[in-house]
Image (cartoon, rainbow, N blue to C red):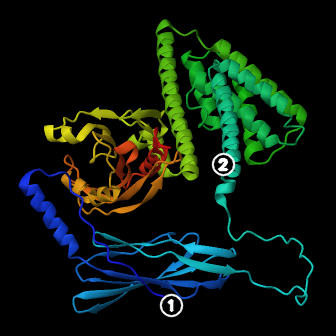
Amino acid sequence: MKNYKLPIINKRHFVPPLKGVKGMLIICFLLVLSGNISAQVYAGIDSTSIQIGEEIRYKMQVEADSTQIVIFPEGQTFSPLEVIESYKTDTTKSGNRFNLIKEYALTQFDSGSYTIPRQKVMIGDQVFLTDSLIVEVRDVLVDTTKQKMYEIKPLVDVDASFFNWRKYIWWIIIPILLIGLIAFLLLRRKKRKEAKENELPPYERAILALQRIDASHLLEQDSHKEYYSQLSDTARKYIDEEVYDHAMESTTDELIARLDEEIKTGALNLDKHTIEELKSVLKTADMAKFAKSKPDIGTAKADRNVIERVINETKNAIPEPTEEELLADEEYRKTVAEKKLRRKIIFGSLAGIGVIAITLTVFIIVKGYDVVKDSILGHPTKELAETEWISSAYGSPPVTISTPKVLIRNNFQLTEEQKQILKGNETFVYGSLIGNFYITLSTIQYNQKTEVDLNKVVEGVVGNFESQGAKNITVKDEEYETLAGAKGIKVFGSLEVTNTVTKKEQKSDYLMLNFGESGGFQQIMVVYDKEDRYAKDIAQRIINSVELKNAK
């Protein structure tokens, strides 16, 4: 393994401009403190030439003070080589210093010469960069003259290892909904038809029932029991509604006895012979229903005519209702109509709730609970994502950016000392650091052309956030270039801040772009709630839209 010893890098802490003797003392103290911190970094690989797909070990060794925090690179920072595995850090202690060894397994599946880029190691507040390394990836040589060739195998159908229910969910739900809708319409039509018939007077309903018996052809089908059951029920229902309200549950003898009493009291002006005919038909019906008797077709049709004659004569024998009876009957019909209306409202409401519940269930299965909930109840960040975005230029030199809402100018008065250095300082914001989403854009112009050290800006990120009440701040940075070619530094990480209203800790992530274009300084920062499932995409969209008009 080849080792590369890197020079010790001393860096100064970035602090905001300080005035007076006190500020100079603090700066000198930080310079002396940072100058006393030292560390050593070694890096190397176990081979500079591999075959396609072969593993190569990249080893980093750090010697640092026991009080220093060491952060090794993570993710695909070794591109164009691919990281197969990042092994755990091996740590040994010697006196008051630590020796840390970190290894990575790398590979590449295309032949060629590749350069492993310089890797960044953070030790305390210092940044160490390793040397870039060249790796040769060779093709695997195959002797086709010795390799036996085979025919291409045909395609073979393979059963799926699992059932992809999401793919077929609509094919299941839609037919079920259609079948349910058809059944609902048919049942509703039947109920409406029955309700319409029930609105008819008892006499008309009885005659309609007899016509249905004629059209049913039950006698031709040898269904005497069903024929006489319908015939008997038709007569009993009519008598139950017009003469005796217990006719349906009474026996034949009890019903005939009651009709005789009605005739004797004068409540029913009906001939005795008609009563005897009705009694004969009802007895025949009882025999057909309970003793499986089967009268001939001629007798059955004659019994049908008897029932119709009994109904007609009974209708004529019933006295005309008095005015009080008519009013009572009208009141009764109103009560019944109100009950039916309430029943319809209840069933209609239940049906509507059922349809809504089924629809919500389908959308939850397909889209997910959170998406459906946010679509119905609303979500502040989701509304930002779906609103019409605004592209505008802010500050001088102008920074173009797309945001969900217009950024508001934050008035900032320069001190006399700052006016001697700065030509202008403009800041535009949306939201606040303790909210779900916070955007700030700042531009600074100097009176004289000044080269801004962006590395110092990175070092000052922690202090800047801490001054606003944040804590547990992590900082990562990388070089950044816009589509138009403006180069800067991208800083990102996480922080915690206490919400002054709820008094709860809020974990947030942040993205920050820093540029030193046109002899000035430009900074764009987005801070968002870590738990917000929409905020990350919005923040990335904002950062990707940033452009400097004067960038060449």
Based on the displayed image, in which of its 4 quarters is residue 159 positioned? bottom right
Q: Secondary structure at mark 2?
A: helix
Tag 1: residue type?
Met
Tell whether 355 sits left or right of 182.
left
Q: Which residue is mark 1?
A: 1
- Quick check: can you spot residue 518? yes
- The image shows residue 185 at horizontal and vertical percentages of 68, 34
Residue 491's image quarter?
Answer: bottom left
Relative depth, front residue between 63 and 292: 63
- Residue kind at label 2, given as amino acid type: Ile
Tell me if label 1 and label 2 are in contact, CB under 8 Å: no
User: Horizontal and vertical percent for residue 499?
Assistant: 22, 50
How many residues crowd mark 2 within 10 Å: few (<14), some (14–19), many (20+)?
Answer: few
Q: Tell whether 397 sits left or right of 506.
A: right
Name the residue nearer the viewer: 306 or 140: 140
Q: Up-down: is 103 above or below 214?
A: below
Above or below, 483 against 15 in this view is above
For label 1, the crowd category at 10 Å Cα-Cα, with few meaning under 14, some 14 to 19 and many 20 or more, is few
Kindly give the residue lying farthest to the front in the view shown.
448
Residue at the bottom extreme, as displayed: 94
Side of 341 where 32 appears, left or right: left
Vertical relation: 336 (above or below) 64? above
Depth check, front residue: 374 or 538: 538
* In front: label 1 or label 2: 1
Q: Position of residue 383 (x, y in %)?
A: 43, 38
Q: Which mark is residue 479?
A: none
Give whichever of discs 1 and 2 has the lower sequence position.
Answer: 1
Q: Which numbered tag is attached to residue 173?
A: 2
Distance (Cα) linking label 1 and label 2: 63 Å
Q: Position of residue 451 (x, y in %)?
A: 34, 50
Mark 1 secondary-structure assignment: loop
